[in-house]
Image (cartoon, rainbow, N blue to C red):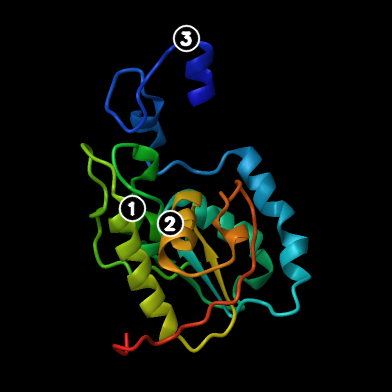
Amino acid sequence: MADMYSSQGKEWTQFKKSPNNPYILPEIVDAPLTQKGRNQARALQPIIQSLENQPEMVVLSSQCRALQTGIIAFEHLVNEVPFVAHEMVREQAGVHVCDMRRPRSQQALDFPIVNFSLIEEEEDQLFHEDRRETKLEIGERIYLFLKWLEQRNETHVAVTSHSGWLMTLFNGSVKCDNSLKEWFQTGELRTVKLEFVNNEQGN
């Protein structure tokens, strides 16, 4: 939609409410995957299936495009392992309605194979129409997610999230190789080994 608007000579300021901003149109609230996105997710199937260690759980952002991506990419694991929606792995929220979550009951109805029990609020509590979520706020969400993940019994976990969230994870929340700090392309898959280390304060 941004390309379409640009081709029409329309200009807008990103993350601002303005008549020409395509990212605030009600038609794209919690935007689903395009056909291109579905094809990209499907292209991951043979790569995932070739992994020596298959995921024991698939964690998905509670937004439509991530839910669809995870279900398509990990299709061979549907009904084999838990598919769990987690609010803390969502994309940076605010202003742009494509990053606004639909009501929990609607997501659960449309994605019945996904467990939404971790999401307590029916309506989106992270989204603000007048401001974008800060990197610090995303970092705090990531911390909560990692604390939750640390308590899990699974060893191999797949996470379907978003490029902005992943950039914050690898550039501000964990120590990692510089190659992981690069921007994630749409439909890109990376495998990492996550190690939890207690600091001197025992956190």
Q: From the image, tell me which residue sits under label 1.
A: 135
Q: Residues within 10 Å of mark 3 (few under 14, many from 20)?
A: few
75 or 125, nearer to the observer: 125
Q: From the image, tell me which residue sits under label 3.
A: 9
| Residue 168 tag number | 2
> Please, what is the three-letter code of the amino acid marked with disc 3?
Gly
**Residue plotted at (78% across, 62% down):** 46
> Please, what is the three-letter code of the amino acid marked with disc 1?
Lys
**Nearer the N terminus, badge 1 or badge 2?**
1
CA distance separating discs 1 and 2:
7 Å
**Residue plotted at (33% across, 89% down):** 200
Provide the secondary structure element on which disc 3 rests. Answer: loop
43 or 107, nearer to the observer: 43
Provide the secondary structure element on which disc 2 rests. Answer: helix
**Residue plotted at (32% across, 90% down):** 202
Residue contact between numbered discs 3 and 2, judged by CB atoms under 8 Å = no
Relative to residue 34, is residue 59 drawn left or right?
left
Residue contact between numbered discs 1 and 2, judged by CB atoms under 8 Å = yes
In this rendering, the answer to whether 98 lies above or below 192 is above
24 or 165, nearer to the observer: 165
- The spot of residue 38 in percent (x, y) is 63, 46
Dividing the image into 4 quarters, which one contains the C terminus?
A: bottom left
54 or 106, nearer to the observer: 54
